[in-house]
Image: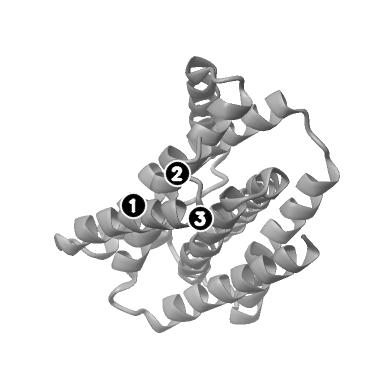
Amino acid sequence: MPLTVLLVSASAFASAAFGGFLALRAVGHVGLIIAVGAGIRIGAAYFDLIPESVEHLGGSLDLAMIFTAVGFLAFYAVEKLTALHVGHETAAELDHGDEAHRHIGFIGSLGMSLHSFLDGVALAAGLAIGGGLGLVIAVVVVMHRFSDGIGIVSLLLASRTPRNEIYRWVALVAIAPVIGVIVGLLLPLPDMVLGGMLAVFAGFFLYIGAAELLPEAHRNDRSRWVVAATLAGVAAIYAFSVFAGVVGGH
């Protein structure tokens, strides 16, 4: 277990740093990479988290879907009511000289760090179950750190944040899931609670993939390849889930 946490942590940190590096270099194919990440996150929710949640909730699909809806709507409410997760559309519209927009950059970065922490808690839940689910969630977390690296750098550059401060935020986004894993592993959970948590995180994954990453991918790249990249991401996580023994094992 400690080795797994160490490997995932190192991979998450490297993924966020690489995403930030690409954003600083303004690479033209960022939209396609974000689309693949969105497909992976959406696929993981449908193929892995929801089925596993049903199993831990005593086979109740109705209860699993209620928890999934709660997760989706909770993340939506937190984002829209508190402006915690500010997307690239906002970043693109920032007035560089406005101190208030510097504050928006700070709040947006804090929001990305928060949902990185929640990814870590989701990973801890997968590791607690063991088998292929923890592996699948680890892949999703590492992939999403890449898009977060891009997002946080773009947002802070738009608000004219000094580069040394940008590097610190990228490091925080990379470290946040590690803290989430530690917190999650230190809190043993009953089977029903674990099942509910998995469904809630499925809702988180669906919201982030569909409402955050896909619009951002299409904003960066308006070609049809974004659709193909999204479908490729879904197909890739399905194939990986079959390989890991998560799909077809219930």
User: Which disc number belongs to residue 247?
Assistant: 2
Give the residue type at disc 2. Val
How far separated are the C-alphas under marks 3 and 1?
15 Å
- Tell me where residue 34 appears, x and y as whole percent: 37, 62
10 Å neighbourhood of mark 2: few (<14), some, or many (≥20)? some
10 Å neighbourhood of mark 3: few (<14), some, or many (≥20)? some
10 Å neighbourhood of mark 1: few (<14), some, or many (≥20)? many
Query: Which of label 3 and label 1 is nearer to you?
Result: 3
Q: Secondary structure at mark 2?
A: loop
Give the residue type at disc 1. Val
Give the residue type at disc 3. Ala
Q: Residue 208 is drawn in which quadrant?
A: top left
Query: Which of label 1 and label 2 is nearer to you?
Result: 2
Q: Residue furthest right?
A: 186
User: Which disc number belongs to residue 249?
Assistant: none
- Tell me where residue 59 appears, x and y as whole percent: 54, 20
**Residue holding disc 3:** 244
Q: Residue at x 50, y 40 (%)?
A: 249
Q: Nearer the viewer, residue 98 or 152?
A: 152
Compared to residue 58, the image places residue 19 above or below, namely below
Q: Nearer the viewer, residue 120 or 152?
A: 120
Q: Residue at x 51, y 28 (%)?
A: 68
Q: Residue furthest front?
A: 249
Circle nearer the N terminus (3, 1): 1
How far separated are the C-alphas under marks 1 and 2?
13 Å
- Tell me where residue 162 appears, x and y as whole percent: 60, 77
Q: Is residue 70 left or right of residue 91?
A: right
- Tell me where residue 109 appears, x and y as whole percent: 59, 58
